[in-house]
Structure formats: C-alpha cells, structure tokens
Amino acid sequence: MSLSRRKTLALIGGGCIVAASATAGYTITRRPNQALRPWTLAGQYADPRRNALSFALLAPNPHNRQPWVVDLSQKDEVTLFCDPDRVLPETDPFSRQITIGLGCFLEVMRMAAAQDGYRVDMDLFPEGEDPTRLDNRPIARARFAKDPNQRPDPLFAHVMNRRSLKEPFDTTRAVLPSELGTLQAAATATTFGGSLEPDDIATYRELSHEALRIEIETPATYKESVDLFRIGHREVDANPDGIDFTGPMFETLHMTGLFTRDVALDTTSMAYTGGLDAVFANTDTAMGHIWLVTKTNTRRDQIAAGADWVRLNLAATDIGLGMQPLSQALQEYPEMAELYRDIHNRLAPNGGTVQMFARIGYGPQVAPSPRWPLEAKLVQT
C-alpha cells in the first residue's frame, strides 16, 4: 500500500519526522524488490502448469494472504489446497472470502493456460467440502490438456496491470453507464448488480463507512489486520503477504517509531486517528458501486464469485476504471450482523448471498502488491 503523500501525512497526524542521515536516506528509498519479483517472472516457465500458476498467484485475494498451495506431483495436474495458516478467523470466520480468493486464483490459472492452448478441466472439492471451514481436503483438481480448439480469453491481456485501487477516487469524474455495462458483461456465473445513482452512492458510501468503522473499532477484527501489517521494504521482502506499507514516508515513520504495529493498535495515537481519516477517504469518494450475488452460498458459489470478481477487475482495468472491494459489511461475525442484514436486504431482497461489494471510480496508478514466489507455494513431494 504505497499511499499518497496526502494520505500518509493524514496518518501521522502532523507528527514530526526526524531528518534522515545519509544511511537512512538510502534505506527509506528502497523498494521491496524481492517481493515484487514474481510480477516479472510471470510467464517465464516452460512447464505449462507452472507457467499458468505464475500468473495465477498474482490474483486478488483478501488481505493479500495468498492462501493457495499447489501439488504438481501428478502428471498434467494441479491440485490446489488452502493453507490453513493463511485464513482470517476473525473477519472471515467461515473462510468465505478466502474461498473467493481461491476462485480468483483458479480463474487466472485457467485463462493463462488457455493463452498457451491448454484446456483446464476442473474438479472442485473432489473429496467433499465443509461450509463452516476449509480443511486439508483439496479445493480443486485441475487437469491440463493441449487443445487446438482452445481460444485465449481477451481479459487475460490485463492480468499484469490489474490492481485493487486503495486510494481516494476523483470525485469530479463520473463513471458512465456504458462502463457499468462493460463490467456486467464480464460476469458469467453470478448475478451482477451496480448503481451510479447519486442517492445510492450516498447510501452505500455511508454504509461502507459505518462497516469499516465497526471493523476497526472491534478489537479482535482490527488486531487481525494490524498483525498483518508489513511496514517497510525489509518486512515486505521477508514476508510478502498481508497489508504492505512501503515508500519513503512509511520507511521514515517506521524508523522513527511513529508508525509501528503497537502504535497502530493504540486508539489514542495520531497514527490510529489519522489512519481512520485516511481509510474513510476511500469509502467516501466512491463514484458508484457494484456487487455480485449468488442464489445459494455453497463453496462452489464462492469459487464462482471469485472467478467473476477477477473478471470484473480485469474488465475494469481494460477501460481504466478503478475498483476496490469493500467486504466489511459482508462479514459474518456478530458485531457486523445488523449491517450484514441491511446490505442483503438492499442488494439481495429476493434472497441469496451478496458475495462481493465494491466501490468504483477513477484514481491514480498504483504499484502491484507483493507476492510470494511460485516455489514457495509448491507442496514438496
């Protein structure tokens, strides 16, 4: 999360930044090059499975947990598992959002394979599924087969430029109805919804703001996020998942003790109050909203929602539109129950589950998120 200067200054609440020495100056300008290397290695593998996986691991996923683990021990097969150490028990108690992230992974893998002329036959949850938790059974078994009739997916062209835009949007630039239509056309397995109406924008801005406030003011859910803060290039390179804070300002703040995990947890600190203002600036600049609904809430529904979600993100990238998931009101822990009912009554009045909800608009270009290398995600056999 390389935040803008305005946002970073809001975070420190006007605190004093100590002047850096020459050595410190070198440190604060470093980027997490190792953690960004998977973006340059994508597509460089001879094995079609590894090549497809090198793109799949760039897929969006909650809190950048990258919960995927793959087994390549069987010829022409990829078996996908969820890493149990990378779930989010407080904000995502049933691992619904984690499963959606795995669906994003599988869809990008499928598209990357198609680009090389391979068909992927997917067997989801081949050993069964548990609606309350993800266990050690496989999420999917995917078989790769060379197919002369396989056609590339046009959306794949945008995988390398896809981002989740976690910056304030330009409130002077409206999203056009035709652009909403472009997103709708990308959804193939779920029910797409969206609105650009001013009254709806105001309502959903307020709802998103309140849901984010609840998540931050609920100690267990907020701590789950703060524990995943990676502050500065050294931390990000050492552990390239979670919520990254990089760039000269954050390096300096971290070196001077003005921004640490302990400081972020202190609700009386300027980092905490300034951080609230910064994240609310995102929800409060939404220029439209989109959502995905499924009739039921099976694991297969969640995988399908992930596939459609990444397709929407790629379609948005194609037209230069920014989007950011705002999943707080969809989370299934007790403190969020009232807003969970509210958003479902609004977006799924005839029943079903709202799987994804996001703001859309135009904003600045941002850097890619850190990733673990492919080799770190392979089961050792």
Image (tube, rainbow, N blue to C red):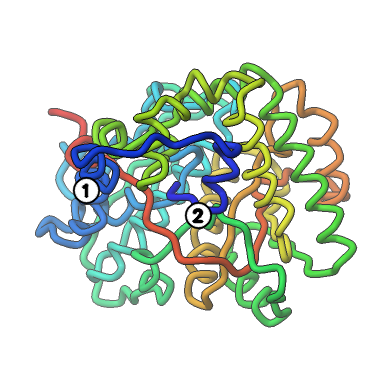
Q: Is residue 192 left or right of residue 309?
A: right
Above-or-below relation of 273 to 322: above
Q: Residue at x 26, y 56 (%)?
A: 39
Q: Residue at x 30, y 31 (%)?
A: 235
Q: Is residue 185 visible?
A: yes
Image coordinates of residue 379 in percent, x first then y, are: 21, 31
Type of amino acid at the residue the image marks with label 1 = Asn
Mark 2 crowd level (few <14, some 14–19, many ≥20, 10 Å Cα): some
Above-or-below relation of 223 to 355: above
Q: Is the Cβ of the residue at disc 2 closer than 8 Å to that at disc 1?
A: no
Out of 51 and 7, give the one closest to the viewer. 7
**CA distance for labels 2 and 1:** 20 Å
The residue under label 2 is: 4
Q: Earlier in the sequence, mark 2 or mark 1?
A: 2
Which is more foreground, mark 2 or mark 1? 2
Label 1 element class: helix
Image coordinates of residue 38 in percent, x first then y, are: 23, 51
Give residue 187's mark.
none
Type of amino acid at the residue the image marks with label 2 = Ser
Q: How many marks?
A: 2
Image coordinates of residue 33 in percent, x first then y, are: 21, 48
Out of 89 and 381, give the one closest to the viewer. 89
Out of 277 and 341, give the one closest to the viewer. 277
The residue under label 1 is: 33
Which residue reaches farthest bottom? 178
Above-or-below relation of 41 to 232: below
Image coordinates of residue 166 in percent, x first then y, are: 55, 52
